[in-house]
Image: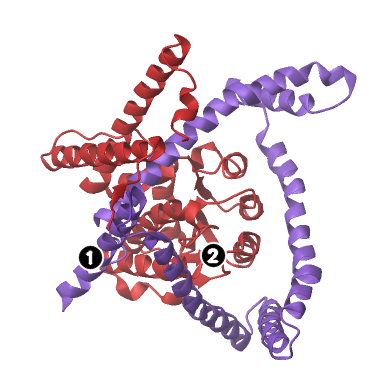
Chain colours: A purple, B red
Amino acid sequence: MQRLKLYMPLFVVLLTALLVLVDFFTTGLVDGIGHALALWVSIIAGILLLLGLGNIARVHLGRLQKGEGGWPYSMALLVSAVVVIGAGIVGRVAGYQDGVSNWIFQYIYQPLATTLFSLLAFLLISAALRTLRIRGIESALLVIGALVVLLGQVAFAPFSALSSISQWFQDYPVLGIIRGILIGTALGAIATSLRYLLGVDNNYMR
Amino acid sequence: MNITMALGPSTVFVLIALVAFLIFFFIAWSNIEQGRNHTLRSLRPLNRLRSLIGQSAESGQGLYYSPGSGGLNDQPGAAETLSSLTTLGEVSHGAARAGATLTVSANDTLTYLAAGDVAQAGFAGAGRPEDFSRDNVRFITQQDRLAYIAGVESALDSETVAGTVMLGRFDSEYLLAGETASRHRIPQIAGSSRVEALPLMLISAGADETLVGEEIYAAPAYLSRRPALLASLRAQDALRLLIIVVIILGVIAASTGVVSDIGNYFLR
């Protein structure tokens, strides 16, 4: 039984990988199996969402019960979750379709998300001020590069001469580095995927 | 039934890369198993990670681990998340041996369940299964990057944490959590292959604490030193050399006019 528990997931992983690879490299043998398996994953993920909801409810109900610091936020989270789920169900049953849920997303969720995202501008300035201090040759080069690229974006005449230097920076050194990172990343992704497909990276079942 | 190979130039390239990788991988694995030399260059963020686990155990404060704001069901970032989960296995193993606690969060149900299993296996592997609690693995959101990071930020704000380890697929939203950690003077280990996140990680976590690009895929091999993982690093390097040779030959061929439009050949 122990051995079955060990080898069954490996067998499933290997079989799935083979099917997807055969689907990718051939036509007429297992056409569309890759899409079908991706759909299965979505269905399984949808079912597992209930487990995730259960975890959220347990964590925040526990916080409410114990009266831990920040319990009002837990209360707000649980109430919001119940309202949104309830709005979705009631909206469907009452024939409004997703009108109520869409309204919540458009007028409550999206403005909140945009507000949060806009904080990035201020955080970026504070982080840059902390980092861009000249401590040595490397940091001096970093500051000079940052200044050239920043001032190169400014439309005013005194700085317009820097725009071609800024563009050169972005077109050659920066693009070269980005492509290097992308090639390395692609190789890493291939290696990680193949390790899982071959079953040698199986720490989820050790 | 008419079965044919669906091989265009781009699929041929993928096939060659796969076969070459497998050949390099098995040769390297055999060499490592035979005890041949496999020295690795030092990666400072991983040295910092090891000392962070020790500090966490000494201070009695837990580590916070995030496998990225992507997920296993998020196709472009799935490999990154898988690699981060392998690293999580090694970090939880190390944390269990040192006597540190670990909190893990996820932005995806599949990642949440996998992270729970991996962390549990890590603690069990270190002989301390009783130190692990499933309550320390938290599902925060379902594939909503911004809301997930807001959840991480809130946890870092309200809990006492010895350090954060955030490796995986992040975008610019990383800065929200990174700056919260900086504000509370929480040491960070960060890493991503996304160029949108890397500069922000470098300025928030620091250059010595950030794994850049492919280094996040190398982290599990560095931490575990298992032969199969080391072999895959060797195979990556061999494949990289092959690609460099192909690029140089391609540049020469295109510059001398032997072939034209070589760049678009593999896109067909």
1 vs 2, front mark: 1
Residue B214 visible in the displayed image = no
Q: In this rendering, is residue A140 above or below B266? A: above
In percent of width and height, residue A86 lies at 68, 87
Q: According to the image, label 1 marks what residue? A: A11
Residue visible at 52% across and 71% down? Answer: B139
In the structure shown, which secondary structural element does the residue marked by tag 2 occupy?
Answer: loop
Residue visible at 22% across and 35% down? Answer: B38
Instruction: Describe residue A44's horizontal placement relative to residue B239 as left or right.
Output: right
Residue positioned most to the right: A157
Q: In this rendering, is residue B263 above or below A88? A: above
Amino acid type at mark 2: Asn
**In which quadrant of the rendered image does the N terminus of chain A lie?**
bottom left
Instruction: Describe residue B122's horizontal placement relative to residue B260 as left or right.
Output: left
**In which quadrant of the rendered image does the C terminus of chain A lie?**
bottom left
Q: According to the image, label 2 marks what residue? A: B107
In percent of width and height, residue A26 lies at 32, 50
